[in-house]
Amino acid sequence: MELRQIVAMPMIAMPIIATPSIALPLLSAALAGLLAGLPAKLVTALGLGLLIAVHEAGHMFVARWMGMRVEVFSLGFGPRLWGVMRGDTEYRISWFPLGGYCRIAGFTPDDDGKYDDSDAGSYLNKPAWRRFLVILAGPGVNWITAVLLIGGLYSTVGFLQVDPHSTRVEVVPAGPAATAGMLDGDRLLSVDGVPLSSFEDLIRELHKEGAPAERAISLERDGHSFELRVHPEAGRIQVGYARELKQLPLLAAIPRAIGVTWELTQASLGAIGMLFHRGGAASLSGPLGIIQQAAIAMKRGAAEFVALLAQISVGLAIFNLLPVPALDGGRLVFLGYEIVLRRRPNAKFEQILSLIGVLLLFGLLIGVTLFGDLQLGHKLFGK
């Protein structure tokens, strides 16, 4: 799985991915066939919509677990397009599709007058640690979902693994081995008649003192053995370990998936850091950029599409945890202040900072979409 240095902008409510209940079926062969028959952009929109739903569902389920009343669960912003009441919660679809939200009773500071101290379901009336868990749940579910997606891939499609005891090779294009006619998957048998049992044997023979410029390498391909004449460059023929797909039982795949998700987390943090360094290779992608990347991955196959969704899920979890007002990370800063000092921050001050944060995020979103996704600067100035 490639670790790409791309920082995904939130689709305003932030983030991503399929709920755990559908993550594993998403990887099944039957669904892979279904996805292959749908337009790439439609599948992409469905995938990103599921990511948004999962993030908000994380807030909603933990809020209920903490005894809070959830009033609205919306996919999209703006005017209500459709909705249905289930218990105390209205589930709705709104007109503006790039985002979503979960409205918890008493969540915003200006709800102080609306919900009194006797309202047991109000967010404001719950201990700070409970509110902290509710806010953390959205990014947390994104991260857990990435683990489930990757684990599902490993248990269905499989993952590429190197066997250090094998002499099967992947061939570097235009290298000495490729020029001689060697192909990916060939198994090396000997060099100048000396049997090979590992890559260490190959390296030792290629670097043997006094070795001729042309080496006779015997190999096996499709059950047939034959010999190629290869001219190494500085003792190298430009081959590497062949990687083979290996499936794991789900219980074994999850621990490995946790490790890969942690690597993606580190890559996302590194990419964000690179944004603040001159010459950094990372770039911001807005909604259009995310859709374009996901549509390309979808055309390459359902497995690559799911892998990219897992990557985006991790990136959005990290983005949400940045200590910026209006993001989950900004709210966690205020809650951390309250937990440590045992007093609430000024509600008006928090509200003003959150409003400023929303405006800055919308400005950043518009800027990234125009100058990043649509390359407006390049089109206008040719740079």
Image (tube, rainbow, N blue to C red):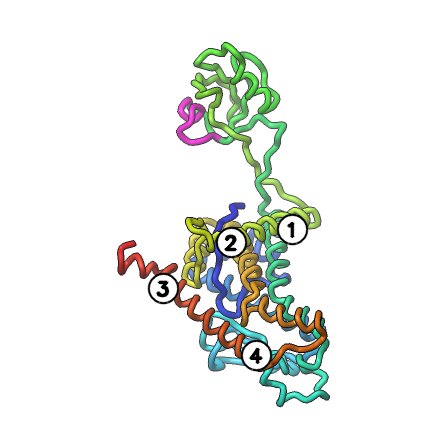
- Residue 260 seen anywhere in this rendered image of the structure: yes
Task: State the residue at coordinates (28%, 58%).
Answer: 379
381 vs 93, nearest the viewer: 381
Residue 370's tag is: 3
- Residue 39 seen anywhere in this rendered image of the structure: no
Of mark 1 and mark 2, the one earlier in the sequence is 1
Q: Residues within 10 Å of mark 2 (few under 14, many from 20)?
A: few
Is 247 situated above or below 371? above
Task: State the residue at coordinates (66%, 69%).
Answer: 336
Q: Are marks 3 and 4 in contact (CB under 8 Å)?
A: no
Question: In the rendered structure, which amino acid carries the disc numbered 2?
Answer: Gly
As helix, strand or loop, the secondary structure at mark 1 comes to: helix
Of mark 2 and mark 4, the one earlier in the sequence is 2
Give coordinates of residue 229: x percent, y percent. Answer: 44, 16
As helix, strand or loop, the secondary structure at mark 4 comes to: helix
Q: CA distance from mark 1 to mark 3?
A: 35 Å
Q: CA distance from mark 2 to mark 3?
A: 22 Å
Total numbered circles: 4
Of mark 1 and mark 4, the one earlier in the sequence is 1
As helix, strand or loop, the secondary structure at mark 2 comes to: helix
Q: Nearer the viewer, mark 2 or mark 3?
A: 2
Give coordinates of residue 90: x percent, y percent. Answer: 59, 81
Q: Are marks 1 and 4 in contact (CB under 8 Å)?
A: no
Residue 349's tag is: 4
Residue 87, quarter of picture: bottom right
Q: Residues within 10 Å of mark 1 (few under 14, many from 20)?
A: some
Location of the C terminus (image quadrant): bottom left
Q: Nearer the viewer, mark 1 or mark 4?
A: 4
**Residue matched to label 2:** 273
Judge whether residue 176 is colored magenta.
Answer: yes
Q: CA distance from mark 3 to mark 4?
A: 32 Å
